[in-house]
Image: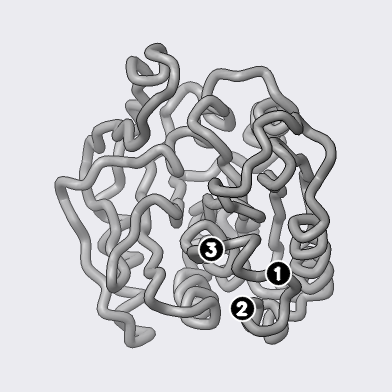
Amino acid sequence: MDNAIALPSLFLSHGAPTLALADSPTGRFLDALGPALPRPRAILVASAHMPAPQPLLNGNAAPATLHDFGGFPRELYTLRYPAPGAPALAARAAALLRDARFDAATDAAAPIDHGVWVPLRRMYPAADIPVVALSVSPAHDASWHYALGAALGPLREEGVLVIGSGGFVHNLGALDWQAGEQPIARWASAFADWMERHVVAGDATAATAWRTQAPQPLSAHPTPEHLLPLFVAWGAAGGHGRRLHAAWELGTLALHAFRFDGAA
């Protein structure tokens, strides 16, 4: 690819680990998304399933596939995503973050969790693009994560695809196992509509205040780790977001995806 043209950044909802194998609208969307993008030289994924007090980057040259879930079909536990790591990229990202006054570090032994490998297995099944995982910090707010993403913005001009992997509405305790794709709970759609409106408008000031401004914020996200990757991806590009995909499962689980290309 021409590295003079910055790659977009993406927010992807990864749903359940079964997304890796199941035929679903979101799975088919991800299957088509990878080939539709310029091929990156590397991928950096901020994952909801990699919490840390301060930014931590996977600096493993050959990261293991972590099956950090239980109670799913046996075949999921046999899957591997053997993409190479990128220790030099992890070090570069950590340096950018430290320059922005984040206390960033790398971990040469860290695996990649399912927030990383499940969507990438659909987007890039050959597993031939180097991958670095980045933590989120639930003790810090959305503005902090937006600034974290902004510090990583220069990577987009270096051929790195920055992805935030989480969930647009994510409350596992409120799943309706009888609902399928419909009906959608009113509180869940109200939150998703509010957040999408601000993302598309490019209003990060309002969106980062979601805990006090959005409708039913603690119903949509009892804990924030699945929404925080949105702000990392948004901060990496800034500007207006564009919705690429919307899907609902089990009445309350929003599997929306957004693309950010920077200020118009």
What residue is disc 3 on?
A: 222
Residue 109: x, y in percent?
A: 15, 46
Q: Position of residue 131 (x, y in %)?
A: 38, 43
Q: Which of marks 2 and 3 is nearer the N terminus?
A: 2
Name the residue beneath numbered marker 1. 216
**On the rendered image, what quadrant is the C terminus found in?**
bottom right
Q: Is mark 3 on a helix, strand or loop?
A: loop
Image quarter in which the N terminus is found: top right
Amino acid of disc 1:
Gln
Can you identify the residue that label 2 sits on? 211
Nearest the eye: 219 or 18:
219
How many C-alpha atoms fall within 10 Å of the one at disc 2: few (<14), some, or many (≥20)? some
Compared to residue 46, the image places residue 105 above or below, namely below
Q: Is residue 156 visible?
A: no
Answer few, some or many: residues within 10 Å of disc 1's Cα (few below 14, many 20 plus, some between 14 and 19).
Answer: some
What is the CA distance from the residue labelled 3 to the residue labelled 1?
Answer: 10 Å
Checking the image for residue 149, the label placed there is none
Q: Which residue ends up furthest to the top in the rendered image?
A: 75
Q: Is residue 181 above or below residue 59?
A: above
Work out whether mark 3 precedes mark 1 in sequence or the reverse, and give the earlier one: 1
